[in-house]
Amino acid sequence: MSNETIIGGISGKEIRVPDANGPPMPELGPLGVLVNGEPAKDFGAIDSQRGYPDVLGFQRKLGLLLPATNTTMEPELWSILCTNPGFDGISLHTANVSTPRPQLHTAADLLEYKRQFLEGLTAAVDQILLAEPQYLIMGMSLEHILRGIDEVRTPMAEVETYAARAMATCHDATLAALERVGARRIGLLTPFDKLGNENAAQMYIDLGFDVVATAGFSCANTLHIAHIPDWAKEKAIVELLATSSNKLDAVVQCGTNMSLCRLSEKLEPELGMPVLGINAVLLWYALRENGFTAPIERAGVLLREH
């Protein structure tokens, strides 16, 4: 497989993009196109030596790594891509990280979830590479199970090396997003408990931001995060975070199983500040890094204006 090297549109780093469409593609059996089990006469040849692109992923094939309990991120990303015609030809290919005990009642539960997720990453990467993605997205907010930016960066760098693919991560994407919108004083909206919020806040402090307030829903099971109602998220943002006394520059939402695009669109004009949902921010970063610069509608001010 040949490679192309591009310069990341946000990071400025060299990004290796594997050629997923090089010949022979598609490789056909010796009899070629068949009709009733026999070679089709006068059909013409599908010349696999020219290399046909993936019909739905002809611009870029993105690999999405998700906890198996996450029911939100993939449909939320598809909802953005499918309502923005300029991104036709960008496809998502998902592999799940098995986390059979997703309970988060106690600190011990959090440690067990951390062990399961990190141990399951390699198998998920092996699975996703079968689809030959050209770029990866880490669909997991690691900041709640790993404390501090150094602990978060280390396993993510290992995944990139193992997969031989560049990858969008929550910490890189939100750092870039907050810098783009000029935010320093932030509030965090999360599905996490006290320890998870403390860990998340520490990562953003390490990245140089002033975490003024955190609001967490203390979900006791990772599957249940997707069921937090929009009215509760809105109430937490408006009444607990974006208050006049907190004087925030932006709200940052952690936890990829919590959807926020619709609320971002609703609340940003009312609050006069960016409301950055992690799924939209990750997709924004992945697209911009890969050179797709068109405005992205219906997912918040960051995607529309930056």
Image (cartoon, rainbow, N blue to C red):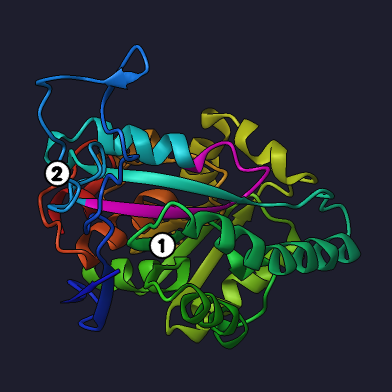
Query: Circle 1 is placed at which residue position?
Result: 136
Number of labels in the image equals 2
Q: Which of 2/117 is in front? A: 2
The N terminus is located in which quarter?
Answer: bottom left
> Residue drawn 74% across and 57% down?
193
> What's the amino acid at mark 1?
Leu
Q: Which residue in the protein does label 2 denote? A: 47
Q: Where is residue 288 in the image (x, y as percent from the top left)?
A: 20, 62
Q: Which of marks 2 and 1 is in front?
A: 2
Tell which of 165 and 270 is nearer to you.
165
Give the residue drawn at x 21%, y 64%. 290
| Labels 2 and 1: the sequence-earlier one | 2
How crowded pointer 2 is (Cα within 10 Å; few <14, some 14-19, many 20+) is rated as: some
Query: Is residue 205 rendered magenta in the image?
Result: no
Query: Which quadrant of the structure image shows residue 264?
Result: top left
Q: Which of 144 and 69 is in front in this view?
A: 69
10 Å neighbourhood of mark 1: few (<14), some, or many (≥20)?
many
> Can you say whether 108 is above or below 56 in the image?
below
| Disc 1, SS | strand
Kind of residue at disc 2: Asp
User: Where's the C terminus, which quadrant?
Assistant: bottom left
Q: Give the range drawn in magenta.
A: 60-73
* Residue drawn at (39%, 72%) of the image: 165
| Residue at x 12% of width, y 48% of height | 295
The part of the image, by quadrant, that contains residue 32 is top left
Q: Can residue 297 be seen in this view?
A: yes
SS category of the residue bearing label 2: loop
